[in-house]
Image (cartoon, rainbow, N blue to C red):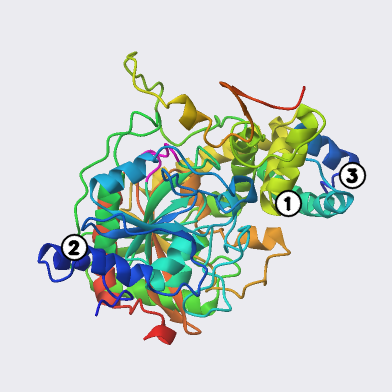
Amino acid sequence: MTRITRDEVLHVARLARLELTDDEVAKFQEQLSDILEAVSKVSELDLADVPPTAHPLEIANAWAEDEPRPCLQLDDVFANAPDRDDDHFRTPPA
Amino acid sequence: MIDTLRLTAEEAKRLLEAREISGAELFAAYAERDDDLNAYLHRCDDPGGDGIPLAVKDVIGTKGIPTTAGSRILENYVPVYDATVIANAKQHGLRILGKTNTDEFAMGSSTENSAYGPTHNPWDLSRVPGGSGGGSAAAVSGGLAPWALGSDTGGSIKQPAALCGHVGLRPTYGTVSRFGVVAFASSLDQVGPVAKNVRDCAYLYSIISGRDANDSTTVEVPKVELPNADSLAGLRIGVPKEMNGAEGIEIGVTDAVNRAISLAESLGASVEECSLPRSVDYGVACYYLVAPAEASSNLARYDGVRYGLRVDGDDFREMVMRTRDAGFGDEPKRRIMIGTYALSSGYYDAYYATAQKVRTVIKREHDALFERFDVLVSPTSPTVAFPIGAKVHDPLAMYLNDLLTIPSCMAGLPGLSIPCGLSEGLPVGLQLIGPQFGENTLFRAAHALEQAIDFDPVPERLR
């Protein structure tokens, strides 16, 4: 049984930069436990000699010519920015 | 009078070229139709011209047209460039009718996870259209678009096509560019066509596919052949017993699929039972580790800095956490947390690394079958369209709806769903899976079957 604790939910939420309400923590503790229990099924197989697959195509590297190409104008880059300061994105202090 | 419920894109093209209808009339026929399905999140004005109109799933970036991915976090996002598939569509004159509803970030099997309300199934408004591409599916089956673009990570084109009674292709991984498409799980995401019949599906695939310098996972694609033949002579069909006999498949679904398999035999195909034992048993578990792991990484970009929602905080970290809490709905939060957990120190080997090895097992099982068969068939979805609300509080039950679409997605293979009959008055989808780059084989097989099945794609309540 892979039940996760309240502290584990809070730890994962912190890693993922999610601020959860108390109700969310309780709900997700239950749901995530159920999901993790179901996906733990992958550990049943004997996979000793099996290599991992990260990607279904066998592409090693896709090279492009190293040539300058037109890129977005600054006003386009900032068009969706919540807060802009000249040519910077402005955020609260770190 | 243009019958938007029946008009195929091919026929629309013919009418336009023969000047029997104008481009403006054609666009207006769709644009003026009332959207009582909540298929569209945003409808567009006619940009002019005489190309075929197209609906676009709202995870695909469209310059100057809002693109929300069904999420509050992108509510006010307006892309400043077109996705490659949109650029390709425009090059062929296609005109965007609007952006269609989707489960938030394409995470879901019913479109109920959209922040903008559920989409209704055109066959029965109380039922889901499937998901995540329920908006594109409902638009095509409900007469609101001749065809549409969808995206498929674990079944988001095929399953809605099955539940709404039309044709959907999830192309081979690497054949269609994802440049400009909102990323969910990058080793799985594929853009594909949603259409009223197989020929339209093949035609739209020919427009959007091909290598793109802006997506390094794309490859050269074999020339697309529009299917013509009615015969299946020489086609070797495999029927994986685990996919056709899986627990939870409704009897009416099995009956319709078995009738289609018999028809295939009568059209000259050879049919033989085969086995994908571990792909079906372990596919869902593997998927719900790999996809959330990739999602947790892809969705890290929504931080309130460069675009999207921002909720202010006293410092940077607080702003980011508040933004993400307010902007993401429950399903993205669940998947981000599952993925973060599976990738985190101490759990990586047990979860993510193990799932990647299971993925190899799934791929090998499929590769072995395609040495003996040209096409594998099964139901697309274990059930017909289910009632809105039926599974929304049980994420795990919702995940199991993807049981039959997931394995071939993990293997990177193309899959096509065509309607093969009704059960309880609702459409049943037949899934055809092909080998890598086997789209032309799928189109040929599906077209011949489509002619023989002769399914009426117009929902009974709209006839």
The residue that label 1 is drawn on is: A35
Which chain contains the residue that carries disc 2?
B
Q: Looking at the figure, which quarter contains the C terminus of chain B? A: bottom left
Foreground of the two, B59 or B267:
B59
Instruction: Let me know if residue B177 is in the magenta part.
Output: yes
Image height of B370 relative to B118, above or below: above
* Category of crowding for the residue at label 2, using alpha-carbon neighbours closer than 10 angstroms: few (below 14), some (14–19), many (at least 20): some
Q: Which residue is mark 2?
A: B13
User: What residue is shown at x 37% (from left), y 48% (from top)?
Assistant: B171
* Same chain for the residues under marks 3 and 1 in the image: yes
Identified at 63% across, 57% down, the residue is B115
Q: Position of residue B88 (x, y in %)?
A: 29, 43
Q: Specify the principal SS of the magenta part.
A: loop
Near mark 1 (Cα within 10 A), the count class, few <14, some 14-19 or many ≥20, is many
Q: For the magenta stretch, what is the residue range?
A: B172-180
| Residue at 45% from the left image edge and 54% from the top image edge | B57
Q: Which residue is mark 3?
A: A6
Instruction: Rate crowding at label 3 as few (under 14), some (14 to 19) or many (20 or more) other CA atoms within 10 Å.
Output: some
Q: Chain of mark 1?
A: A
Residue B444 in picture, x, y percent from top left: 23, 59
User: Which residue type does callout 3 highlight?
Assistant: Arg
Residue farthest to the left? B18
Q: CA distance from mark 3 to mark 2?
A: 58 Å
Label 3 or label 1, whichever comes before in sequence order = 3
Figure check: B9 above or below A83: below
| Amino acid type at image mark 1 | Ile
